[in-house]
Image (spheres, coloured by chain):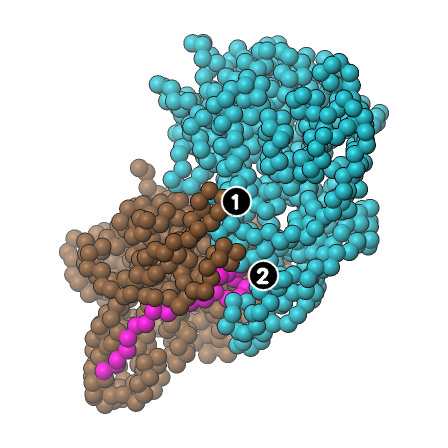
Chain colours: A cyan, B brown
Amino acid sequence: MLITLRDSDIAKWVEAACYFLSSEHDRDLASLVEEAVDNIRGAQHEDGYINTYYTVVEPGKRWTNISWSHELYDAGHLLEAALAHYEYTHSMRMLGPLLKYVHHIRTVFGLDEDQKAGYPGHQEIELALLKTYESIGDASLLELANYLIEERGQRRPEGHYFDVEAAARGEPPNPGPAPRDTPRYAYHQADRPVREIEEIEGHSVRAMYWMTAVAALARLTKDRSLLVAAETLWGSTTKRKMYVTGGIGAVATWEGFGPDYYLPNETGYLETCAAIGLVLFAYQMLLIGPYNNDYADVLELVLHNAVLVGVSLDGKRFFYDNPPATIGKHTERSAFFEVSCCPANVARLLGSLGKYVYTHGPGDTIHVNLYISSALQVPLSDGKTAKVVLEANGPWLGGAKVEGISQEDHDCANVDIDLHAHVTLRIDFTYNVRLVYPHPLDLDNRGCAAIARGAFIYCAETIDNAHIHDLRAIRLVQPLEVEESVDSDSFDKWGLHPVILTVNALLVQQTEDRLAQKGVRLKLIPMFMWANRGKSDMRVWLPIITSDVTGEDDIL
Amino acid sequence: MLITLRDSDIAKWVEAACYFLSSEHDRDLASLVEEAVDNIRGAQHEDGYINTYYTVVEPGKRWTNISWSHELYDAGHLLEAALAHYEYTHSMRMLGPLLKYVHHIRTVFGLDEDQKAGYPGHQEIELALLKTYESIGDASLLELANYLIEERGQRRPEGHYFDVEAAARGEPPNPGPAPRDTPRYAYHQADRPVREIEEIEGHSVRAMYWMTAVAALARLTKDRSLLVAAETLWGSTTKRKMYVTGGIGAVATWEGFGPDYYLPNETGYLETCAAIGLVLFAYQMLLIGPYNNDYADVLELVLHNAVLVGVSLDGKRFFYDNPPATIGKHTERSAFFEVSCCPANVARLLGSLGKYVYTHGPGDTIHVNLYISSALQVPLSDGKTAKVVLEANGPWLGGAKVEGISQEDHDCANVDIDLHAHVTLRIDFTYNVRLVYPHPLDLDNRGCAAIARGAFIYCAETIDNAHIHDLRAIRLVQPLEVEESVDSDSFDKWGLHPVILTVNALLVQQTEDRLAQKGVRLKLIPMFMWANRGKSDMRVWLPIITSDVTGEDDIL
């Protein structure tokens, strides 16, 4: 099979490899990374430019189609990889060339007369520039990011930049797929300047990478109106357009957002990369507002469900999209995708997972976002370093111990810690099974409930319920009788012994011309673990009835 | 604008024009038809072949890609047009050349060694051949149709015909879009021979044209097992895969069928042409079993809803797909489509509407399928002709009078008439408002009801309900209080004064962090009339609650 990779795929692989190498050395992997770095260095032009497509396939066409090519997106991922390489090796072998490339980009794009007033069709470079700026302090990176974010969606006398660019190529404008009535270029979040946008729209990966950068820029520049924009679009994303699994992207046609509360199951897109983008966005919001539990709650939900479901338990097979229900598809993950953005993206997220566990807030406080066992060294304002060790009982059992800190306030939901003293804090909590109900405008899930425990959203998978031919025939009965048990068998192959749930339910059966029902036991597993044991169907939202419904005329 | 038309688009226009000319002469239209006939005659090759694409764009490539080209489909539509032209003019000017073309096709395709064992990727020619055979009695047409229907999906030692054909073009096999787990070529209904297929799958227009031909062949050849196949797939289509509006095609990706009872609203495809295909299929089933009310009921439902909704009240704008709900799309019909199959298809159906009103059954009986005022001359078995006049009170008011026949059995649902006597039959019936509930496995419409009156399915359109911002917030309340009234105003521009419905409903409102509800009046119109008065949203299925639900904790 001929495999075509973008520059960004290589970049994400290098980035992920550097994260893993930082915690555990591997000579072969390190040598492969350096080989990739050599290739990237070798691909650089005299003026700093690096892009294999415009070097080999379409030379001379540089910067003629930044609205639809991934030229600046590739540059962003290369920069993130270079930063990870620098932080791992403390060598400038990759970051040096990338900074040269960025400075070249800065000469090409801007508002001067000899520059192009453009910005990328697929956002990514903005967040890469800000991340690199925060690490190495080169103010020109901040300036370029600021320009790209502020210029996006501006109306210039000569017209929208993407139209101008299309005209220069002799092509008609192509504002991309979107519902008939949305503004032009809403697919790219480029219809208006960011402060004028009130609803998250268009391609969801583009949107999340962009919001990550917008939130970061608001924090770094303390720009109040930009912060309001980030908060507005955080609300739009997570309160009205996010699935119960933390996934986003209701519409497959444009791999992106639908209207508020439109969360269809079987046709939902919920791209793994979009979930990763939402983790990045949540993290930036946490850095701004560590006391806002919303951010940590979404971060935890998305990581444990919408992200993890994208990769098989053996780490070798992937889902690109993750609809929260299938019918008769008997789905399995794929080992390869033509557009292979998600696998390498999962790898780099998991490789950098540590940074999401705590947030280091103002006034020498840290905030525990995820109960994942870990150790942390926190630089304090007085020049000292606090060492914190978190021992969590894991995602299935509640409870955690935080050592090396003193405690002022130990509300579990908001562990706010003074780092100057030294005590041990035991946090007792248990995970209870919760029923989640849909919003009244979410008609696709009307009369249904989802089941959650701890950080996990559960699902029914046919492979566990062979006696149930069609999961749509299940009726949960309220009040729900749930039995929790540790399953030491089903996922033992992967070293996982999750808490699974068994509930009493009714099964609707069509016999001749009438409907009947019979009692059944239904097994539920954490949603992210489905599709690992062979072809199967799954369903997150399940119809629920009250126990006094018995007749045929009732809504079954 | 450059407009590209297929041969079939011209053919369907000629066919429709001939139908309308048969009932009302128009010199300009007749002259345009003859001009088109001249062009078609002029495009014919020496050997009989007619196809502009393979004459002008890809000469020399005839019959190299019948799985994906529309070469045989175009031939079928040309033949149907020629038949309509012959029946209107009694001249062979178009039918003569087309019969020559069909005889040429017969030499190319078949099981002889020097023939191609192929059949079309898009069915249509089969039904055209059988229709023409029934009109002019040329047995070679029946033979060719029989071959094409029987050969479809056969497994030959050299492989599936579409694979063989792709290999000859030097291309990899392309079985078309379909869910991961369906059989190959299910998109084309060509995965297995028809008698082995138990579930209707794939592209819905292809499927309906095919079933029309299968049912016709079963009737003409009195082939019992083929009839069973037609009945099986009639059940699959209408009992488990048809929307409440009579539309079919749940999945836009392949413009076709989804799993049983999977009937999503906003993403549903419900192509106008597929509904027309279902009318053709229902009509063929009626010819086989005029006593089976199912067939006439589906015919009436589909015609009054799924077909009519595809065209605006002024006849100038169209919907290609007809999902039974929209959110924030503020949809309007289009005046033109790049693939413009639907508009001409609606025209030819409406031009030939008369034939669907009655079915002439065995034993000199006729069956009234649609209460549409009309007159009919029925040839009787004793050589005489019965004249029947039906005066209906129209689709809004019940009641009809049938004159010129005697009556044996006047159950309204099944008017079975002896044509040898002569009396007047008055049929009294009223149209009552009915609530329709979804199947228990149709989770997309769980907790909802649709409202019907007579042949019409009703919908709520935002343009009539300006006080309701989002139709998803409506809750019908059971028992429903419905007020029926004749609307002499809203559609008067088009000469239509429909019976509209007003119901009491609740509106769910989100105020700060809690949900509230208030009583509202909701106006409902026949679904086919929506999207004629400006940009608007609509919804057919509406959530319904019982009147004792009042608290916030109840499912609103």
Amino acid type at mark 1: Ala
Quick one: SS at disc 1? Answer: loop
Pinpoint residue A72: horizontal percent, then vertical percent.
Answer: 56, 22
Disc 2 sits on a residue from what chain?
A
For marks 2 and 1, the one nearer the N-term is 1
Amino acid type at mark 2: Ile
> Pointer 2: what residue?
A544
Pinpoint residue B506: horizontal percent, then vertical percent.
Answer: 39, 56
Q: In this view, does B122 lie above or below B284?
A: above
Q: Residue at x 19, y 53 (%)?
A: B493
Residue A250: give its label.
1
In which quadrant will I find the N terminus of chain B? top left
Magenta stretch: give its range.
Answer: B426-448
Instruction: Using residue B178 as the reference point, say whether residue A383 is left or right of it.
Output: right
Depth order, front residue of A254/A245: A245
**Given this view, does label 2 or label 1 mark the residue nearer the observer?**
2
Task: Reply yes or no: does residue B444 show up in magenta.
Answer: yes
